[in-house]
Image (cartoon, rainbow, N blue to C red):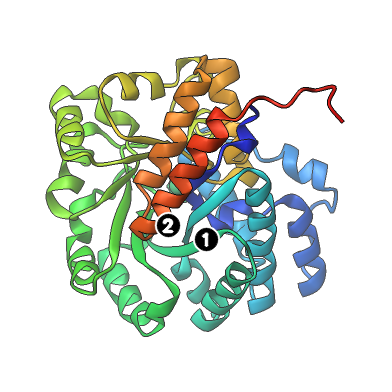
Amino acid sequence: MDAALLPKAELHVHVEGTLEPELVVELAQRHGVALPTTDPAALRAARRFTDLQSFLDQYYEAAELLRTEQDFHDLMAAYLARAERAGVRRAEVFLDPQHHTERGVPLEAVFDGLSAAAAASPVSVDLVPCFLRHLGPDAALEALRTWLPHREHFVGVGLDSTEVGNPPAAYAPAYAVAAAEGLHRTAHVGEEGTAADVAEALDTLGIERLDHGNHCLDDGEVVARLRDTGTPLTVCPLSNVALRVVNALEDHPLPAMLAAGLQVSVNSDDPAYFGGYVDDNYRALRDVVGLTDDQLTALALASFDASFAEPAAKDAWRAEVRAAASAPLASPTAS
Ligand code: ADE
Ligand code: ZN
């Protein structure tokens, strides 16, 4: 079965990371911004990174082209059209509102544009704004206070941006407010950070999921804790290769995570930058890492298990996965 035919949830995708070079060119024209080149292929070729920060620098610069409600709408509409073709039934989409509001973009333009595109898509979508680590914990708390009047637009909060030098515990006050408001909680930890950072996030943030979490594997006790609490990890294989969190896809620790009994889902992170959408990540796991169709089916089921969606919707999507997995393969010669 092709990976795109497997119904799946995408739980770790940054909407700003779905900004394809073609849309960069369109937005630059729309706003009269001069680019070094207007050739999308050349822009795409320049998306090469040595680590997380080298990526973030490009990602934030390109995201400065997002200025109006229409821009945010067009970005989300393009992602959801592609996600639908990838078999995504449910998308829990991160955004970085602080990066937009600090440039003077009204929060309404961000939320209204993204939510309008989501409402027009057959994909079930919820938004998860993230606190930007490089702006610090006070700014996070202040940002959350400005987001709360727009509570109908989002279901949870996340934590992203520069991990090294910005340990998670400082964000505990913002996470406590989020919990008191009934918001879901997840955080990027253990991507470039350590297993100790993962333990600190579990101790202090009240998170329901862990984004990336790769370095948990360096400490058996942290792995056991994640396994025993059933804390799901949203893993992003192509991202990990592009940002050199792993040396090569062949060496990706996802099989080790499964063997350790961790709850894992497969996600794209920033697909316009890392060479593939979520279906491409599933395909890479099959073709390069050697996962079987049964393992991919289990990963698709796990993606719904870890979703923040309503239980009845999750049940229906899991039934769809089982039906897709047991359907006979279409003959390539059948008309
Ligand atoms: N923001 C967008 N993608 C990210 C990643 N992979 N890690 C941390 N922050 C991010
Ligand atoms: Zn991410």
Q: Is residue 123 in sight in this rendering?
A: yes
Residue that extends furthest to the bottom in the rendered view of this protein: 149
Residue 5 point in image, percent of width and height: 63, 37
**Quadrant in the picture for the N terminus:** top right
Q: Taking 308 as reference, is 332 left or right?
A: right
Of pointers 2 and 1, the one earlier in the residue sequence:
1
Q: Which mark is residue 313?
A: 2
At horizontal 50% and vertical 39% (from top left) the residue drawn is 321
Q: Can you give x and y, in whole percent of width and height, for residue 65 in the image?
A: 67, 66
Q: Residues within 10 Å of mark 1 (few under 14, many from 20)?
A: some
The label nearer to you, 2 versus 1, is 2
- Total tally of numbered discs in the picture: 2
**Which of the 4 image quadrants contains residue 139?**
bottom left
Left or right: 31 with respect to 310?
A: right
Q: Amino acid at mark 2?
A: Ala
Numbered disc 1: secondary structure: strand
Q: Is residue 230 above or below residue 253?
A: below
Measure the C-alpha gap from mark 2 to mark 1.
10 Å
Residue 332 appears left or right of 303: right
Res. 161 visible in picture: no
Q: Are the residues flagged by discs 2 and 1 in contact, CB closer than 8 Å?
A: yes
Can you say which quadrant of the picture contains the C terminus? top right
> Which residue sits at x=18%, y=60%?
172
The amino acid at mark 1 is Ser
| Residue 163, numbered label | none
